[in-house]
Structures are given as C-alpha cells and as structure tokens.
Amino acid sequence: MSNLIDLQNQIEKLQKQAEDLKSKEFASTVADIRAKMQAFGITVKDLGGKVGAKRSKAGRPAKVGKVAKVRRSKATGVPVAAKFKGPMGEAWSGRGLTPKWLKALEVQGRSKSEFAV
C-alpha cells in the first residue's frame, strides 16, 4: 500500500506530464484554428476578441494579474434625455457629476430647479 508521500509524488509527476502534453498540442491546435479561420475568412473581430491583445511566449493571452470584473448594464451606451438645460444650451441628464456650468450658476445663488426641463 502506498503512503501519502508516494501518492503526492505520483500526482506531481502526472500533473507535469499533463502540462507537457498540453504545451505540445497547443501549437498544433493554434495552427489548425488559424488554417480554418483563413479558409472561412474569419477574423479575431468576428470572434469577439481584442485585436493586438498582449500575448505570452506560448501565444496565450498574458496574465497581467487580477482584474476587477466590469459590470455593464444591458442598456450601456443608451442616451438619456436631458433633465436640465443651461442658459447657453448646455444639457445634463442629471446623472453623474454636476457639470461645471451648473455648479458655477449654483455658486452665483441660482437653483438647480430653475434649469429643469
């Protein structure tokens, strides 16, 4: 019967074999994918990837460290109607930071509600 140390050594050896096999097959898999992309006229943009993304020596995307996930709403980029209009035609939706033109008018003693649409 094997002891714990023997089993851990076996696991380590098998993991190394798996990594070696993966790295050997990686290049041929990439070559196969590139050939199919060329045959069908598929671009990286068609796949939804970023053109010019940094790559490691093995051709894989470089690991840069942990990156915070960016949450995007389904309505990203949808324009919002203006809720405030300035005297010079400036517009503000009421979202985000107060614009400089409105801050300046508030400093002069005017109310934000004066500019509500």
Image (spheres, grey):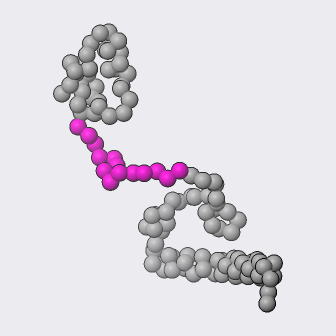
66 relative to 98, above or below: below
Indicate left or right for 21 with 35 as reference. Answer: right
Residue displayed at 50% across by 76% down: 37
Q: Where's residue 105, x and y in %?
A: 31, 14
Q: Choose between 84 and 9: the one closer to the eye.
A: 9
* Residue 74 makes an appearance in the image: yes
| In the displayed structure image, the side of residue 14 where residue 44 appears, left or right | left
Q: Nearer the viewer, residue 113 or 46?
A: 113
**Relative to 13, is 68 above or below?**
above
Q: Residue shown at 74%/79% (left/top)?
A: 11
Name the foreground residue: 3 vs 67.
Answer: 3
Q: Which residues are magenta?
A: 68-81
Q: Tell me residue 57's x, y (percent).
A: 70, 65
Residue 33, by quadrant, is bottom right
Q: Quadrant of the N terminus?
A: bottom right
Residue 114 appears in which quarter of the rendering? top left
Quarter occupied by the C terminus? top left
